[in-house]
Structures are given as structure tokens and as C-alpha cells.
Image (cartoon, rainbow, N blue to C red):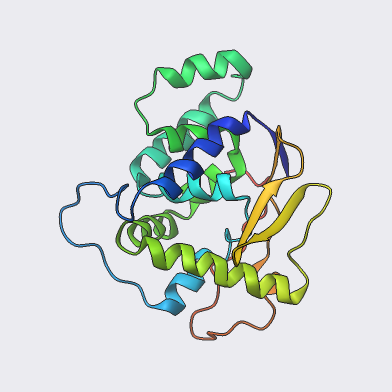
Amino acid sequence: MIKKVSVQTLLWGLVLLLALPWGAFAQNTAGPSPQFKQEELDQMLAPIALYPDALLVQILMASTYPLEIVEAARWSKANPHFQGNQLTAALEKQNWDPSVKSLINFPSVLAMMNDKLDWTQKLGDAFLAQEKGVMDTVQKLRAKAQAQGTLKSTEQQKVTTQAQTIIIEPARPQVVYVPACNPAVVYGPWMYPAYPPYPYYPPGAVI
């Protein structure tokens, strides 16, 4: 799916994430977050690891606010007529985290996170407790897809490698592409049969 949005809104999240030390986004929680094994990290990140960097960061940040994800998904479904400046003004009245608000522009992603709330909760817990492990796993999965020939530059996205870090950006600055990444296909034979990737959720699907 190709979505036209203000990419500047998404890019700030990536810049902020790279500039701050690990743990900077941690929220106050009632207790220590669970520690996930590597196979669990691979399992939960497989559906989104090939998303453009700026969008991926927003998803990770938003996953730490699961209740707001539910509220935003319900609000989005109830207000499909909001567009452009009207949508911006309406979102300013909401008290959600900016990362959650940004996903209103990506209804299929928001629907996925709302529909699969158990996955969203685990993703948020992993990001809060194991940020470096999460980002390392994203790079590992991207490298695997690249080796399979399923991650490469296209008309919709630009894939580059800088200092052994695989970067995915929109090919056109004002168009963000949400790829249809079926984990069962893009990564080749899965390395953890006991921990298969979370089910594929096609872009464009609605709740």
C-alpha cells in the first residue's frame, strides 16, 4: 500500500530514537518488563522488520501505548471522513502519544496493532526492556531478506547499507510505502520452527 503523508512527522521519531540513549522511551510500569528470547524477538518482529525505518520506529514507539492504540483504532473507524487539515486539527484534540497519532495515517497498520493486541503488547514490552535487541533483530531479519533477494530497492522504496546498517526509505519523500511482507516468504526457511512468525496481516485489510 502507498500512503501519502507528511514524512517529516515520521522522520522525527527516527532521528529522536538514534539520538537518545537506550531506555529513553521507557514508560513507568508496574514492574519489570519480561525478557524475550531471541527466537521470540524474531517471531514478533518478522511482520514489520522490512517496513520503512521512519514508520517502523513509530510502530515500536506506539506499541508501548496499547490502550491508546485501541482508542485510536476505534476513533479512526468512527471518523473516516477526516482528511488533511481537518484530520490534523481533530488529532490535536486527542491526548495520545504522537507516535499513536501518526499511525492514523496508516489505517492498515493501526488495524493490525489493534486486532493483534497480544502481539502489540509483547512488541511494546520488548521495545521497553530490550531496545538494542529489538533493533539488532530488525537488522538481522533485513539481512536475511536481502540474502533471499526479497529486500531491494524498487520504485516505492530505497534500500541502502551504511556502516553495516540496512536502511529502508521511501523512494519519493512524500509517499510512504507499506510493503506486503509475508514472513513465510520474504525470509526463506524459518530458523525457529517452534516459534513461527506472527501471522501475516496484509496491508489494506480493515477491522
Viewer-proximal residue, 109 or 74? Answer: 109
Q: Quadrant of residue 16?
A: top left
Number of disc labels: 0
The C terminus lies in quadrant: top right
Measured as percent of width and height from the top left, residue 1 is found at 73, 45
Measured as percent of width and height from the top left, residue 5 is found at 65, 30
Viewer-proximal residue, 104 or 161? Answer: 161
Identify the residue at image location x=54%, y=77%: 196
In this view, 89 is above or below 122: above
Identify the residue at image location x=62%, y=57%: 201
Q: Quadrant of residue 84?
A: top right
Identify the residue at image location x=76%, y=38%: 172
In this view, 132 is above or below 12: below
Measured as percent of width and height from the top left, residue 205 is found at 65, 47
Viewer-proximal residue, 93 or 204? Answer: 93
In the orientation shown, which residue stands out farthest toward the right?
Answer: 155
Looking at the image, residue 162 sits to the left or right of residue 122; the answer is: right
